Image (spheres, grey):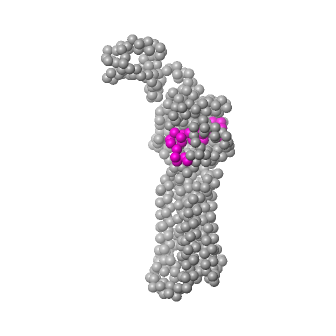
Amino acid sequence: MIFMRELKRSRKSLIIWSLVLAGLIIWLLSIFPQFAEGQKSMNDLFEAYPESMKQMFGMDRINLGTLIGFYGIEIYMMTTLLGTIYSALLASNILAKEENEKTIEFLLSKPVSRGRIVLEKLLAVVVNIVILNIVSTISSLIGFQFTKDADVPGKTFALLIIATLLLHLTFAAISFMLSSLMRKTRNTLSASLAIVIVTYFLNVMSGLSEDLDVLKYFSPFKYVDAANIINENMLEPIFIVLMAAIIIFSIFTAFMVYRKKTLPFNWSCGAKQ
Amino acid sequence: MAIVELRNLTKSYRKNRGIIDVSFSIEEGEVFGFIGPNGAGKSTTIRTLLNFIYPTSGSATIFGKNIIKHSQEIRQNIGYLPSEIHYYDDMKVVDLLKYSARFHKKFSAERMKELASRLDLDVNRKIEDLSFGNRKKVGIVQALLHEPKLIILDEPTSGLDPLIQNHFFDLLKEERDNGATIFFSSHILSEVQKMCDRVAIIKDGKLVTVETIEHLTKNKVKNITLTLEHPEQLHFELNGMIKKEVNGNAVTLLYSGDIKALLKRLNDLPVQDVLIEEPTLEEVFMHYYE
C-alpha cells in the first residue's frame, strides 16, 4: 500500500526526469554521425586540449571516434551524473518527508510496522530507479539507430548499463540512510547532493595524477569509470564488492535507525500547536 | 473486560516532563475522558499507548494485549484522531480516507459518504485547500471509518464550529451504542462532561484522580463576575463561596454552592452586570484538591 502510494507520488518527477534524460541521450546520439565525420579535425582539437583535462574525462584512454567511446564519454556522463542526482533526491526525500510534513503520526497509527514502512519505501525507490534506467537504455538503443554502420559491442554496452544502475543504487542507498537519520528534508537533500558533488569531484581529481590515485576508492563514480569498463570489458570485482557493501550497510543502518527513532522529534520537546 | 489498562506507566524525557506512574483502566463500551491542562501529559500517554514512543517503565495493555509486543495487532482496531492533523497535501480527501481504511482492510464507500455528509465535508476537495476545521473533519472520518473497537481522540473539537461539534458528538454516541469504547482527551471540562462516563484528571504528568462525571459535577464550580457601584461595601456571604476578589468595579467569585441560593441573593443586590461562566480547569483543580 505504501509502495503503491510512493510510486504514485513520485510518478510525475520520474516522468520529467525520464523525458529529459531520454531527450538528451537521443539528441546527443543523433549528432554522433556528424561528429564522427569530423573526426579528423576533432582529433586535432582534442590534441590541443591540456593533458590534465583529457585525463579528467578519460579522453586519453577512450577513442571518441567510435560509437562506444562517444557513448562512454558523452552519454555515460549524463546517465551516471543526472541519474545519480535523481536517485539521491528521490531517496533522501522518501523517509524524511513523512517527518518533515508531520504525516508520520498518521502512518504510525495504522496497523503497519516501522520495518514495513522502510521496506515499502525502499522498494519504491528501487523500482523508480530501475524504470529510469530502462528508459535510458531504450533511448540509447533508439539513438544507436541514427548511426548506420557504427556498431556497439553488446557486452560492453550491457556492462555500462549495469554499472550505471549499480551506481544509482549506491547513491540511493546512501541517501536513503540519511533520510532515516535526519528529520528535515532540506537537510537530507543538501547532504545527499553534497555527497554526489564531492564524490564526483574526487572522481575527476583521482584521474589527474598517480599521487591522487587513492582517491578513487572514495568515489563511486570512479568504481564505474567508463574508460576502464570499455578497455577491460569488465567491471572490477573490488568495486562491485565495495558498492554492494555500501548498499547493504546503508540499508541495514536505515532499518535499524528507523525502528528505534523517536518519531516525530518535536514530541519529546512537548511542543504543541 | 478492561479495554485499556495502564499500570504505573512512566515516560520520562531528558529535559521535559513526561508522565509518572499513571495507572487507570477503561472498561468496554465506556466513554472515558482524559482531562488536564496543555502540557500535562495527555498526548504523551496516548502516544505511548499507540507505541509511537516507548515507556520508560510500567506497562499497559489494550484489548488485553501488551502495547509494545502486539502494537500492530492492536492498531488494527483503533481509530486515532491526533490533536494536530497533518495529511498528504497532494491527496484528495477521498484518497486519504481510502488509503487509511485499506491499512485496516476495511473500506466502505457508503460509510465514508455517510460520515462525510454528516460532518458536512466534501470528499472531493484537495487536502491542501482545506481549512483547519475541515482538516479536523477529515481526521474524524479517518478515525471512525474502519469501525474501530477503540476510538482515541486527542483534542477532537478544536477548530470545529458548534453545529458540527454536535453532529460529531452524535456520531460518537452511535459508535458507543454499537459497542465501541471511546477515549476522549481534552482540556475543556464542559465537553468532557457532556460526553463521558468517567474522567481521569492529569496534571504535571501525574494522575490526580479518576472520577465519575456525576461526582465531578456535584461540585459544580462557577466563576461569577459582578459589576457594582461600590463593590468594597458588599457583604456577600453564602455557603459554597470559595474565593472572592475585588477588582475596581468588578467582584470575582468562585462559587460551588446552590445556584438558586445565589440567584436569590443576587436579586437583592444593586448589580449592573452579571457573568456566570465555567471556571478554567486550573481553578477547578485548585478547588477540587484543596
Residue at the image position 52 percent from the left and 35 percent from the top: B160
**x and y, in percent, of residue B196 in the image:** 57, 28
- Tell me what residue is drawn at x 64 percent, y 79 percent: A153
Q: Quadrant of residue B54?
A: top right
> Dividing the picture into quarters, in which one does residue B192 lie?
top right
Say if the magenta span includes residue B56.
Answer: no
Magenta stretch bounds:
B126-150
Q: Residue B234's spot in the image, x, y percent?
A: 34, 15
Residue B123 coordinates in the image, percent (x, y): 59, 43
* Front-most of residues A230 and A249: A230
Which residue does the image show at 49% across and 44% down from the upper left?
A268
Q: Is residue B185 visible?
A: no
Q: Main secondary structure of the magenta part?
A: helix
Query: Is the residue B113 above or below the residue A223 in the image?
Result: above
Q: Is residue B36 left or right of residue B268?
A: right
Q: Residue at x 64, y 51 (%)?
A: A1
Would you place residue B260 above or below residue B87 in this image? above
Residue A195 in view of the camera: yes
Residue A167, placed above or below residue B222: below
Q: Residue B206: x, y in percent?
A: 50, 33
Residue A135 sits above or below residue B198 on the image: below
